[in-house]
Image: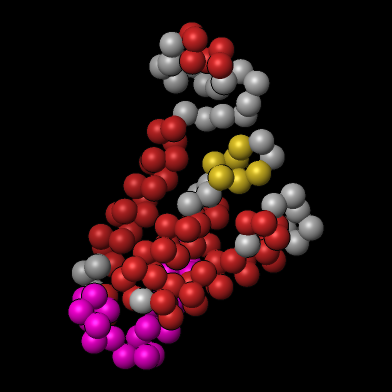
Amino acid sequence: MGDDWNCPYSCRRRLRGINAQPHHSSSGKLGIFAIAFILIMRFDVFKRLLVGRASRYERLSLSLVFGLFGIAGTYLGVPVQNAIANSRVVGVVLGGILGGPLVGLSAGIIAGAHRYLIEMNGFTATHAA
């Protein structure tokens, strides 16, 4: 743990045995997602998606976009005990909420397949995908 983390001594003593980082490091990474989603909501295709007027091609394109957000969530994760505590689910779930089950399922398949293929025989490859 870094010296810049302002935590009482008792808190550090409790976390001594685990490889933990302060919670504010992951909230900063989720802030990147929030800014990205605010910026993409300015596009007309996302507005049509919200009101249910997006075409099939636009939904497929948005599946790819939300799948890429899921992939980015894999790399923006925080290492904890030789595994990645990630935010992959944020992009996938948001795609499902905004675009419906087809967009969410497609984005989940994209992000899950990527996770499985980057570390096929790893500790969490089949469980995390």
Indicate the quadrant containing the C terminus: top left, top right, bottom left or bottom right: bottom right
Q: Residue furthest bottom?
A: 56
What's drawn in magenta, residue-wise?
Answer: 47-69
Q: Residue 127 placed where, x, y %?
A: 67, 57
**Magenta-colored segment: predominant secondary structure:** helix
Indicate the quadrant containing the N terminus: top left, top right, bottom left or bottom right: top right
Taking the spot 35% from the left edge, 86% from the top edge, the residue there is 58
Which quadrant of the view contains residue 25? top left
Q: Residue 80 placed where, x, y %?
A: 61, 37
| Label total for image | 0
Taking the spot 41% from the left edge, 77% from the top edge, the residue there is 101
**Can residue 44 be seen?**
no
Q: Residue 85 placed where, x, y %?
A: 56, 45
Residue 129 to residue 48: above or below = above
Residue 22 included in the magenta stretch of the image: no
Q: Residue 19 placed where, x, y %?
A: 62, 29
Q: Residue furthest front?
A: 101
Taking depth in this image into account, of 5 and 90 the one nearest to the observer is 90
Taking the spot 51% from the left edge, 69% from the top edge, the residue there is 108
The answer to whether 107 appears left or right of 43 in the picture is: right
Residue 58 to residue 122: above or below = below
Which quadrant of the view contains residue 27? top left
Taking depth in this image into account, of 75 and 127 the one nearest to the observer is 127
The answer to whether 110 appears left or right of 48 in the picture is: right
The answer to whether 123 appears left or right of 42 in the picture is: right
**Can residue 126 be seen?**
yes
